[in-house]
Image (cartoon, rainbow, N blue to C red):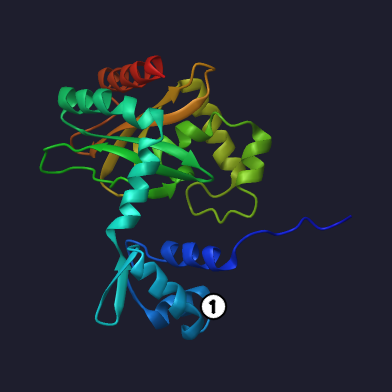
Amino acid sequence: MAREADYRANALVRGLAILQGFTPRQPELTLSEIAAGQGITSSAAYRVVVTLEQEGYLARQGNRYRLAARVMDLGYRYLGSLDVWDLARAPAEALRNATGFTVHVAVLQGTEAVYIHRALSERAMVSNVPVGSRLPACQTTMGRVLLCDLPGDELDARFAGYAFGPTPDSLATLKAWLAKDRARGHVAQASDLAPGTFAIAAPVRSRQGRHVAAINLSGHVSQLGAEPALVAQVRAAADQISGLL
């Protein structure tokens, strides 16, 4: 069988990989660190890094680089292309105002929940996940709300070779959780990723009934729990956004 031709531009692939190498834990990198992260020589990385700097995607201070504002511009263009982002903002802020807790909206990409909107609470103790954050879907309330809409074979494909942590410890455990999430219609639990926080999430549905996004209410465990009234408010906000799609 003939191999499919690979038309990818290697320099572009490398440039994108370099941009993805910057993380909240490593917001600044030297040229040597960038090269080591990509498994290439510093000379091979240099031309790509200089190009990214000149085009406004990287900024340099001394011998260290960090992401520049043009990357954020691309991010906001992506958000602006999502109908759910535009339509969710007012209901999310109304939910924040009504409850006093932070509200997030996320979509699913691969095995990650990507946060596309945040309505931040004014409480002293807040749950604060910045827009653009990518968290393991199987470990977040919104991620599980989104995953529970996927058929079993798609879950198998997405999580093939996935390195599960202590919770959940396997795909079988995740599937058991998702079956209960699906029947319940929402997810409410303390966070494994951010100890001390609690969240309630519900699905935003397309006209075809698919889970296209999720919305959550999150706050400190001393202030927020799975009270039926709060669950109802989150589900009502999700239904309101769904009705706008």
Q: What SS does tag 1 mark? A: loop
The answer to whether residue 235 is above or below residue 136 is above
- Residue 76 sits above or below residue 208 on the image: below
- Residue 206 placed where, x, y %? 48, 21
Q: Amino acid at mark 1?
A: Gly
Q: In the depicted view, which residue is nearer to us: 105 or 69? A: 69
Q: Is residue 102 left or right of residue 183?
A: left
Q: How many marks?
A: 1
Q: From the image, which quarter does the C terminus lie in?
A: top left
Pick the front one: 62 or 225: 62
Which quadrant of the rendered structure holds the N terminus?
Answer: bottom right
Taking the view exactly as shown, the residue that stands out farthest to the right is: 1
Where residue 30 sits in the image (x, y, percent)?
35, 79
Relative image position of residue 21 (x, y in whole percent): 43, 66
| Residue depicted at 51% across the width and 84% down the height | 41
Residue 180 can be seen in this image: yes
Specify few, some or many for label 1: CA neighbours under 10 Å numbering under 14, 14-19, or 20 or more. few
Q: Residue at x 44, y 61 (%)?
A: 20
Identity of the residue drawn at 65% across and 50% down: 160
